[in-house]
Image: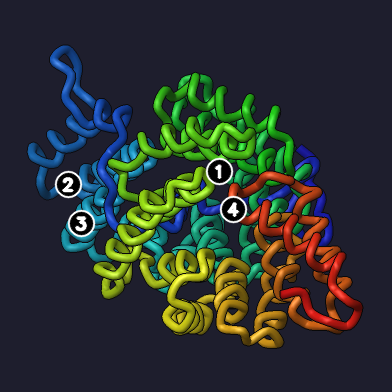
């Protein structure tokens, strides 16, 4: 396929980029959730056949000093993690690779796989160091550029991420590189290009790779939802669930979709089914659904559970709890001082647009509007077409008399993308617009 480069992005045909999805998807999840029903089946031995995980574990027992057996176990554990969402498996995969490293400290494959695993645990500095060492040793191995692109994306070095993903695409056009290119397209304000690349990734994925196909279809659903095409989002999530019944990521997307369709009770029921996984962002989403339904006590119980869960994990660097707690508190205007403290800590270590947005919104709730506007501009610097980012920037601008027109324009843009992207924030955006339209000129909208 003929390659071309567009506005510095990596392109394939209509090229794009990827996200942490294909190799080590970063879902901003906390500590290890329990496996889903589908995932549990993958972990449970069938009486008539051995699962890949059982076979890998048997191989390690038979040959405890085999480096390749440890590699195989780590890879299978990572695949099961993708299928189930059980983040405890990251630690088990890492342990297998550390055992391999003890057996052969100079083994290239061990170092390469270890970079992938630690990236999945959000230890991006370690992942970058390991992957870059692998690139020096073998610059033609496409895999390492994917890990580098993932890590740089998550820490906010988007130019570096584009370069890495472009290199990956150049070396190995395929599902892993296409999906990374797609995410870069989305981040840089080109959801249509992202969808084209995800379609290429789906075409490049084998028909029997059920989880991989479901993952790509779910990403497509998320992009469709973000741009307000609810019918296409429905089709994508349904396709993912048909390919991988009970797939937790598709169910989470479907819950948001039902809320956008005004089916809050159904949205809450789907989200309730995901509670065993104990993912803080999903616990908070369930609280939002309850809040939108007027069930304030149930909403508050969910919110308190999130704070307790994340607060207990703040000292665990692999849990990403600081970022999640800052985002949770800021998004819902809870404990403004604590939210701002955590957001500043996060922004000091990561410059990605999510960290900038969290800081902007925490500053907003702390009534530091000028600083909030500066942070919001950093969150929007890629031109990402995300209603949430636009909503936050718009609400901040409304508090600055000289930027009221920018604020209303940003809110209208958010609502034009998806008028029901969130059951609480979308109505708040409409109410803010009504207040701004009726407020005297020269005064900020309260």
Cα–Cα gap, marks 3 and 4: 42 Å
Disc 3, SS? helix
- Considering only order in the chain, which callout, 2 or 1, is on the residue closer to the N terminus? 2
The residue to which callout 2 is attached is 66
Q: Which mark is residue 95?
A: 3
- Discs 1, 2 touching: Cβ within 8 Å: no
Residue plotted at (80% across, 43% down): 14
Cα–Cα gap, marks 2 and 4: 54 Å
Can residue 112 be seen? no
The reply, left or right, for residue 114 in relation to residue 181 is left
**Which image quadrant: the C terminus?**
bottom right
> Residue 198: x and y, percent?
66, 38
Say if 163 sits above or below 228 in the image.
below
Cα–Cα gap, marks 3 and 1: 25 Å
Q: Residues within 10 Å of mark 1 (few under 14, many from 20)?
A: many
Cα–Cα gap, marks 3 and 2: 14 Å
- Considering only order in the chain, which callout, 1 or 3, is on the residue closer to the N terminus? 3
Say if 218 sits above or below 406 in the image.
above
Mark whose residue sits in front, 2 or 4: 4
Residue plotted at (74% across, 71% down): 381
Mark whose residue sits in front, 1 or 2: 1
Say if 105 sits above or below 336 in the image.
above
Q: Which mark is residue 424?
A: 4
Nearer to the camera, 12 or 103: 12
Cα–Cα gap, marks 4 and 1: 35 Å
Residue plotted at (43% across, 33% down): 270
Q: Which mark is residue 176?
A: 1
Q: Which image quadrant for residue 235?
A: top right
């Amino acid at each position: 396929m003929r390659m071309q480069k567009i506005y510095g992005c990596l392109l394939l045909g209509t090229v794009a980029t990827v996200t942490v999805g294909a190799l080590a998807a970063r879902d901003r999840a906390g500590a290890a959730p329990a496996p889903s029903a589908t995932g549990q089946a993958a972990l449970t031995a069938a009486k008539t056949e051995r699962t890949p995980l059982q076979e890998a574990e048997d191989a390690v027992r038979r040959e405890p000093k085999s480096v390749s057996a440890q590699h195989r176990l780590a890879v299978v554990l990572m695949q099961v993690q993708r299928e189930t969402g059980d983040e405890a498996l990251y630690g088990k995969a890492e342990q297998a690779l550390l055992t391999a490293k003890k057996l052969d400290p100079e083994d290239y494959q061990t170092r390469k796989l270890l970079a992938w695993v630690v990236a999945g645990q959000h230890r991006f500095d370690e992942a970058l160091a390991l992957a870059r060492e692998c690139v020096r040793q073998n610059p033609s191995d496409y895999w390492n550029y994917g890990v580098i692109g993932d890590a740089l994306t998550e820490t906010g070095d988007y130019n570096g991420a584009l370069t890495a993903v472009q290199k990956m695409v150049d070396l190995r056009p395929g599902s892993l590189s296409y999906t990374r290119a797609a995410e870069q397209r989305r981040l840089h304000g080109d959801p249509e290009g992202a969808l084209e690349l995800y379609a290429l990734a789906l075409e490049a994925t084998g028909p029997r790779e059920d989880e991989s196909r479901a993952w790509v279809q779910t990403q497509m659903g998320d992009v469709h939802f973000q741009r307000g095409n609810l019918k296409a989002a429905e089709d994508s999530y349904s396709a993912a669930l048909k390919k991988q019944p009970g797939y937790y990521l598709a169910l989470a997307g479907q819950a948001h979709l039902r809320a956008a369709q005004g089916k809050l009770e159904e949205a809450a029921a789907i989200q309730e089914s995901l509670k065993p996984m104990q993912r803080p962002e999903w616990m908070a989403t369930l609280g939002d659904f309850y809040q939108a339904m007027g069930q304030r006590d149930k909403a508050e119980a969910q919110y308190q559970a999130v704070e307790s869960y994340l607060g207990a994990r703040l000292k665990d660097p692999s849990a990403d709890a600081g970022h999640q707690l800052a985002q949770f508190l800021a998004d819902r205007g809870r404990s403004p001082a604590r939210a701002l403290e955590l957001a500043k800590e996060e922004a000091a270590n990561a410059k990605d647009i999510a960290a900038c947005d969290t800081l902007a919104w925490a500053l907003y709730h702390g009534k530091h509007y000028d600083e909030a506007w500066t942070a919001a501009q950093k969150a929007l610097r890629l031109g990402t077409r995300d209603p949430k980012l636009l909503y936050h920037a718009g609400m901040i601008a409304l508090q600055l008399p000289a930027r009221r027109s920018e604020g209303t324009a940003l809110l209208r843009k958010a609502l034009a993308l998806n008028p029901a992207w969130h059951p609480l924030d979308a109505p708040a955006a409409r109410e803010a617009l009504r207040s701004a339209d009726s407020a005297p000129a020269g005064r900020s909208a309260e």
